[in-house]
């Protein structure tokens, strides 16, 4: 599967160049840094797909999501009877990823004792299953990622300096979306096309007002937040144009449709103009309430039955 790397920003182009460069060196460890939601996993997958390891597995694990006492078994496997629930031998993710790539996400959350064991694996290229007595050779490229400042973690005694230098052979930093705003319209268009096709919504464009609002927003959740928003808009609304009224209040500043997007009253008459305004207002309220009809009716201060009637009448 090809991983999309979408954007026009010069820093993104440099990241893609770096990914292509390091992909040629099958043994080099890579450390990807950046805020949550910037696409660190996409870069890791790209390095794998661009490398000679592409036919072998790409295995990912979030180091923060697995309890400390289970992480060693997940990574290195265990022998039967190694602990109470070990009813059979199990291969770890390093063995599963042999000849391929293992992606250690949120490496900064790894327990220091586990860090020491990972360091030994990186140095020896061998793992030992929990409860086992023999070393097993593994040929795996390690790519790790973190949204933490590992140098600060080292100073605080939370991260091993020797492991940091082992992981940081080839560093790649991904800037947050607010530092590459020219990529926002490109990414929004990419995800609009993707989800409009997936949900048969008929979207073909984003209005100028909506683009302006999307580009001005700081996106604390970065690309993940933008992706989720466009997906939600496509679930709730019909195309052909994504207008500002579909955007949530934290982006649009108001749940109402901007005046510039109201139809010209002199061309369609007051009754039709009011109907269009009502449609846009209800759509905006539905977006804010994540499609929940009861919450939307409460926001609009009308009975739920009245809202359903209006939605049916307006084709929502």
Image (cartoon, rainbow, N blue to C red):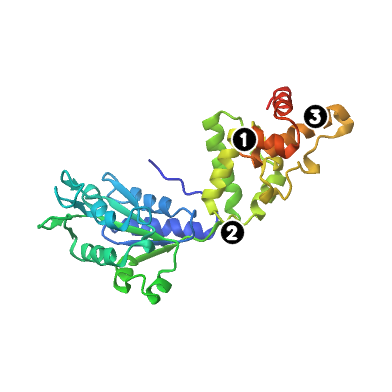
Q: Residue at x 71, y 37 (%)?
A: 298
Label whose residue precedes the other's in the sequence (2 or 3): 2
| Residue that badge 1 annotates | 291
Q: Secondary structure at mark 3?
A: helix
What number is the disc on residue 26?
none
Q: Residue 168: where, in percent of width, then height?
A: 35, 67
The 10 Å Cα crowd at callout 2, few under 14, some 14 to 19, many 20 or more, is some
| Residue that badge 3 annotates | 275
Q: Secondary structure at mark 2?
A: helix
> Quick check: marks 3 and 1 in contact, CB under 8 Å?
no
Q: Please state which of residues 256 and 298 is positioned toward the viewer in this rendering.
A: 298
Farthest residue in the right direction?
266
For the N terminus, the image quarter is: top left
Relative side of 84 to 179, left or right? left
Farthest residue in the front direction?
84
Q: Residue 106: where, in percent of width, then height?
A: 39, 58
Alpha carbon distance from label 2 to label 1: 28 Å
């Amino acid at each position: 599967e090809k991983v999309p790397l979408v954007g026009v920003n010069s820093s993104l182009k440099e990241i893609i160049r770096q990914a292509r460069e390091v992909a040629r060196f099958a043994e080099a460890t890579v450390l990807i840094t950046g805020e949550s939601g910037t696409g660190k996993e996409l870069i890791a997958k790209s390095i794998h797909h661009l490398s000679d390891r592409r036919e072998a597995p790409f295995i990912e694990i979030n180091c923060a999501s697995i309890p400390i006492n289970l992480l060693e078994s997940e990574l290195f496997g265990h022998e039967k009877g190694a602990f109470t629930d070990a009813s059979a031998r199990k291969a770890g993710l390093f063995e599963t990823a042999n000849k391929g790539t293992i992606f250690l996400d949120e490496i900064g959350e790894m327990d220091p004792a586990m860090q020491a064991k990972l360091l030994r694996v990186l140095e020896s290229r061998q793992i030992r299953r929990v409860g086992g007595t023999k070393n097993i050779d593994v040929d795996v490229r390690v790519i790790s990622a973190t949204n933490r400042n590992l140098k600060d973690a080292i100073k605080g005694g939370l991260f091993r300096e020797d492991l940091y230098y082992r992981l940081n052979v080839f560093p790649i930093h991904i800037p947050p979306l607010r530092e590459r705003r020219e990529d926002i319209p490109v990414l929004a268009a990419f995800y609009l096309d993707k989800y409009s096709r997936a949900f048969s919504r008929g979207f073909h464009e984003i209005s100028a007002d909506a683009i302006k609002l999307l580009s001005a927003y700081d996106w604390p959740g970065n690309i993940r937040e933008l992706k989720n928003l466009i997906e939600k808009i496509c679930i709730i609304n019909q195309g052909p144009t994504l207008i500002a009224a579909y955007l949530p209040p934290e982006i649009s500043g108001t749940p109402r449709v901007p005046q510039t997007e109201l139809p010209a009253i002199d061309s369609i008459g007051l009754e039709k103009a009011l109907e269009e305004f009502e449609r846009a207002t209800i759509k905006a309220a539905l977006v804010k309430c994540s499609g929940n009809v009861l919450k939307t009716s409460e926001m609009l201060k009308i009975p739920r039955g009245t809202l359903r009637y209006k939605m049916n009448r307006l084709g929502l």
